[in-house]
């Protein structure tokens, strides 16, 4: 499997840990959109596209359940996605910084 394209859009909002979103093309044939770039305690990481819905738990309480729509199956694939996306994010930062000069 090869990531053949990565596009990053910075989306920094005050009070938010989200720094941007990425779209990735795999093997020139599969597009994955809405991968979030998040600033965590240990630096940047990615969060795969997810959906949420409200369900009733065993106690009859309504809770929100989040579930990834698409996700890597193993740590090697996750590392590949994270490396490519964060590199593209850093390059987007550099381009923005040089425009300000």
Image (tube, rainbow, N blue to C red):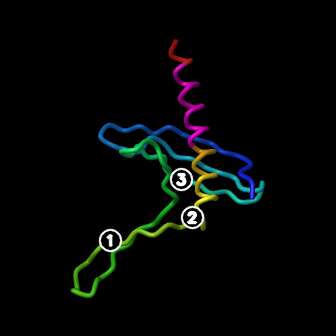
Dot 1, how many residues are within 10 Å of its Cα: few (below 14), some (14-19), or many (20+)? few
Q: Position of residue 79 (x, y in %)?
A: 59, 53
Main secondary structure found in the magenta portion: helix
In the displayed structure, 70 sits above or below 87; it is: below
Q: Which residue is mark 3?
A: 35
The quarter of the image holding the N terminus is bottom right
Residues shaded magenta: 86-97
Q: Is residue 97 left or right of residue 57?
A: right
Q: Residue at horizontal 76%, vertical 59%?
A: 29
Q: Residue at horizontal 44%, vertical 41%?
A: 19
In the displayed structure, 69 sits above or below 19; it is: below
Q: Residue at horizontal 46%, vertical 43%?
A: 44
The answer to which of 68 and 79 lies nearer the viewer is: 79
Describe the element under mark 3 as helix, strand or loop. strand
Query: Mark 1 or mark 3, which has the lower sequence index?
Result: 3
User: Magenta includes 91?
Assistant: yes
Describe the element under mark 1 as helix, strand or loop. strand
Q: Which residue is mark 1?
A: 64
Q: Which residue is mark 2?
A: 71
In the displayed structure, 53 sits above or below 59; it is: above
Residue lying farthest to the top in this orientation: 101
């Amino acid at each position: 499997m090869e990531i053949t394209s990565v596009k990053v859009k910075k989306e920094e909002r005050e009070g938010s840990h989200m720094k941007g979103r990425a779209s990735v093309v795999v093997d020139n044939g599969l597009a994955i959109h809405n991968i979030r770039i998040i600033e965590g305690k240990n630096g940047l990481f990615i969060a795969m596209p997810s959906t949420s819905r409200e369900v009733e738990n065993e106690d009859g309480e309504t809770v929100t359940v989040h579930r990834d729509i698409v996700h890597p199956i193993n740590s090697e694939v996750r590392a590949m996605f994270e490396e490519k996306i964060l590199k593209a994010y850093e390059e987007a930062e550099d381009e923005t910084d040089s425009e300000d000069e």
